[in-house]
Amino acid sequence: MDKVRDRENSKSNTLKYVPPNRRSGVEPGTSKQLLERRLRSSFNRLTNENSQKLIQEISTLLDAALEKGLSWNEVVNLLAEVVLSSVRDGSGVGRINPFVAAHAGAVIYLHVNSNDAFGAKMVAHAARAWRRAVAAKNRASFGLQAVLVELFHGNLLPSTFLFEVIEQLILELDEQKIELLLLLIRSTGPALRHSDPGALMDIVNRVKDAAEVLDLNVLEDRSRVQVLLDLVYDVKNHKTEETRSNIRFVLPWMKGILQELSPLQVQLSDLYDDEFVSTRWWRANEINRRNIENQKANEAGKERTGNGGAALAKQLGFNTDFRREIFTAISTSVDVKDAVQRLSKLKLRKQRYDDCAHVIIHCCASESQYNKFYSLLARRVCRDDRDMLYAFRHGFGNAFRVMEEGSDGCKPTSTYLRNLSQMLGYLWGLGILDLGVLKRAPDLTDCSDESVTFFKLAFESALAPGGGGQMTNAFQQLATGDGFKHRDSIRLPLILFLRAHFENSKDVAMETRRRVRHLIGILTSAEDN
């Protein structure tokens, strides 16, 4: 009897533990139920510190669910429900999930790297749920609004969307709407002022008018109205600073993704329309936006040349069939991904990379206003093939020559300089191009007024929020001489240029001057060593 018991004990000790849902005879549930449980488990563990690893795991999980037969619509809607249920909380403002930025980051990551339906559906779900919660005076509206704010900071929503949110809150002010306005303006006020000062002034006046007609007797805390008025005036008078708790600061690994993103051009009122939401509105909207931009570019080109498309192609340097093919592929594309696919079909050889860079640079410069589409396209093609970097160096070198010498006896316009400088600043700020591009630039200590304006705008764009860290790396590389054969021919004129036009200039923002002093210090420390 003892031998039988010992044999059974030894057998049980060799068996591996099997979770209940994997044991035979146990119904594991449908694929959708399993996906929901795993998503909730992942988002419950999501924090700012582990966000990069967990978000990539969530992306893999969703891809696996799609391979098992779940539809895109099911997966996208389920993700939106899980995210919103994990951030909204009916217990009050202080109980909003502190990692709401990481939740918004997951949506934006999937929107960029997987399918743009993720971001669009999340915006629609959040906006409609927020409207219902505000109408019902439900405290869940605080968490839902926090999601919309982080999507704005993540560049998925335009500033016009938040201006509409503020307009909705101003109507029939009550205690909860005042709290929502305070949270919204505190977290987004400086960004809204920067994007559209005129619209912010209109909001300030409307908040003032709404506060004047408000019956203070219905409020438990009347002082909140004065706090709200003081806040909007502080925002208007540049007395508030941008909060450093938003997605751009707490998830630094996503900076490149956020800068690559183009906001969804949608209005809050559109998302309340069931018929509109039931369509692929984000695709149709993007196509329409690109068509409008292309039409404006063509009209601007015709105005400048007076001879239509042929003259425009000649002015831009598209005097070969191959350059015209590249121009057609770019101008007829829907978005950056589509443009890259169309260019890949041309099977570009390395000998033709200069033509591709030339077309992208001059298309950007010839727009009636700066179009970030071309900068995103340049970033993408340079990231996919390192040899394209040298083509863009050469392309900017030709543009520098045009600035100094002109083209066909004509100096470049202010629009040309502004567009091209922002493109160069964008590529500098992301670390796509290094300061080696200045090898082909004119002498920064003795160049034309057009060149001074150009490089000043380029450095201001590169030193904008989100680009300072990469510029530090670029200056350190120049200071050490890593990859530069004649570093002093760039370093010394650059120090003098920055001192003359940034360090001691009152026209430059204080934060930009501080960053420039730091960069000058990096270059001068190399001289001391």
Image (cartoon, rainbow, N blue to C red):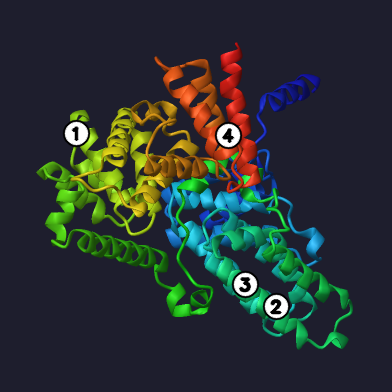
The residue wearing badge 3 is 201
User: Going from the N terminus, do you reach mark 3 or mark 1 first?
Assistant: 3
Residue 529 x %, y %: 60, 11
Marks 3 and 4, the one that precedes in the sequence: 3
Quadrant housing residue 204: bottom right
First in residue order: circle 2 vs circle 1: 2
**Residue 426 seen in render:** no
Identify the mark at residue 207; answer none if there is no mark: 2
What residue lies at 66% left-to-right and 65% top-to-bottom?
145
Residue highlighted by disc 4: 469
Q: Which mark is residue 352?
A: 1
443 and 34: which is toward the camera? 443
Indicate which label's residue lies in the foreground, 3 or 4: 3
Secondary element at tag 3? helix
Q: Give the residue type at disc 2.
A: Val
- What is the C-alpha distance between the residues marked 4 and 2? 38 Å
Label 2 to label 3, Cα distance in Å?
10 Å
Task: Tell whether 501 sits left or right of 205.
Answer: left
Image height of 169 relative to 352, above or below: below
